[in-house]
Image: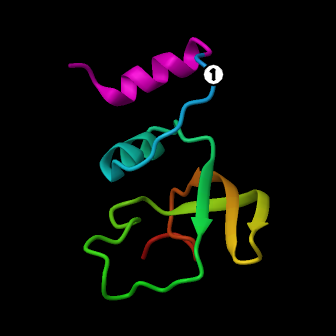
């Protein structure tokens, strides 16, 4: 068993093509912190699930600025939004107190 972050880093350096993850919140957090995430693809469904989720998806993530690259709407309701992430050194509203 190797380190997943180093394995992904090696695949990117070797030009392994498009890599993607689905699920594994801890892996996604680790890859983002290591600067290995090139794109976030977020699919938004027109539903609010305030009481049904056990873990909020972005708990434990660093502060990240998202620059929108592309967006599409399917069936007039569901949206796919693609962002390029940039991990922030300080909170979005300025340096820490």
Q: Residue at x 77, y 62 (%)?
A: 71
Query: In the figure, is residue 6 to the left or right of 83?
Result: left
| 88 part of magenta stretch | no
Q: Nearer the viewer, residue 22 or 83?
A: 22
Residue sticking out furthest to the top: 14
Q: Nearer the viewer, residue 24 or 76?
A: 76
Query: In the figure, is residue 56 to the left or right of 10?
Result: left
Quadrant where the N terminus sits is top left
Q: Which residue is mark 1?
A: 17
Residue 89: image x %, image y %?
51, 56
Residue 10: image x %, image y %?
47, 16
Query: Crowdedness of circle 1 by 10 Å Cα count: few (<14), some, many (20+)?
Result: few
Name above or below for residue 36 compared with residue 91. above
Name above or below for residue 86 compared with residue 20. below
| 13 part of magenta stretch | yes
Q: Residue at x 33, y 62 (%)?
A: 60
Quadrant where the C terminus sits is bottom left
Quadrant in the picture for residue 83: bottom right
What is the tally of numbered marks visible in this picture?
1
Residue 73: image x %, image y %?
77, 68
Quadrant in the picture for residue 31: top left
Q: Residue at x 25, y 19 (%)?
A: 2
Query: In the figure, is residue 14 to the left or right of 24?
Result: right
Residue sticking out furthest to the front: 75
Question: The residue tagged with tag 1: helix, strand or loop?
Answer: loop
- Write the start and end of the magenta stretch as one range: 1-15
Q: Nearer the viewer, residue 96 or 73?
A: 73
Quadrant in the picture for residue 74: bottom right
Residue sticking out furthest to the left: 1
Name above or below for residue 44 compared with residue 16. below
Q: Dominant secondary structure of the magenta stretch?
A: helix
């Amino acid at each position: 068993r190797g380190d997943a972050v180093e394995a992904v880093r090696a695949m990117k350096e070797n030009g392994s093509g498009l890599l993607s993850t689905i699920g594994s919140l801890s892996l996604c957090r680790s890859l983002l912190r290591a600067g290995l995430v090139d794109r976030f693809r977020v699919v938004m469904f027109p539903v609010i699930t305030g009481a049904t989720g056990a873990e909020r998806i972005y708990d434990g993530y660093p502060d990240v600025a998202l620059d929108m690259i592309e967006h599409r709407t399917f069936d007039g309701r569901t949206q796919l939004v693609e962002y390029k992430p940039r991990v922030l050194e300080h909170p979005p509203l300025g340096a820490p107190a």
